[in-house]
Image (spheres, grey):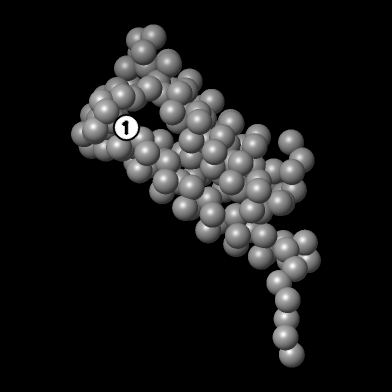
Amino acid sequence: MLKIYNKSAITRQQRFSNALVTGLLAAVCCIAVVYLLFHFVRFFHEVLYIVAGYLIGNVIYNYGKGVQVQFSVLAAVLTLAVIIICDMVIMGGLFAFRIYFASSSLDGLFFIGYRVMACVAAWKSARVVG
């Protein structure tokens, strides 16, 4: 029997699988873009993380079409993974990341704030229902 793929008739598990695969691809692309911008153009700003979070959430929204919290959690976790990997590559490893993260100056607050805003952007843009 010939089966035709019907995008609107897929199950919740299939939607989450679609969101997982496309979200991982989007996360890898975001890591590559941040890496290329930093190493070849010498440009880096934390706003890139907010854009990456929104992009990952939007990809999960478009391909997952889910209303459950698990889609938002997936987007936030993938964004956090992008942030940690990019920070470790840019700052030269986990030790430098920990020193900068623990600083109590205004830079440390902006360091944390941009990353939290990126995860919030991913969380809010990943589900059909806000």
Label 1 belongs to which residue?
Answer: 37
Residue 62 at x, y percent in the picture: 66, 48
Q: Is residue 8 left or right of residue 105?
A: right
Q: Secondary structure at mark 1?
A: helix
Residue type for callout 1: Leu
Please report the residue visible at 24 percent of the width from the left and 33 percent of the height from the top: 39
Q: Is residue 88 left or right of residue 19?
A: left
Identify the residue at image location x=42%, y=46%: 29
Q: Is residue 62 above or below residue 38?
A: below
Residue 84 can be seen, yes or no:
no
**Of residues 105 and 87, the one drawn nearer to the viewer in this rendering:** 87
| Count of marks, rendered view | 1
Q: Position of residue 11 (x, y in %)?
A: 73, 66
Query: Dividing the image into 4 quarters, which one contains the N terminus?
Result: bottom right
Q: Residue at x 48, y 35 (%)?
A: 52
Q: Position of residue 95 (x, y in %)?
A: 23, 33
- Tell me if residue 129 can be seen: yes
Which quarter shows the C terminus? top right
Task: Specify the farthest residue to the bottom.
Answer: 1
Point out residue 14 in the picture as x, y percentages from the top left corner.
66, 65
Depicted 65 relative to depicted 56: above or below: below
- Foreground pick, 118 / 3: 3
Q: Is residue 18 left or right of residue 39?
A: right
Within 10 angstroms of label 1, few (less than 14), some, or many (20 or more) residues? some
Residue drawn where x is 60% and y is 55% of the image: 19
Quadrant of the image occupied by residue 87: top left
Q: Is residue 69 left or right of residue 122?
A: right
Viewer-nearest residue: 44 or 118? 44
Dividing the picture into quadrants, the one containing residue 9 is bottom right
Q: On screen, 4 above or below 67?
A: below
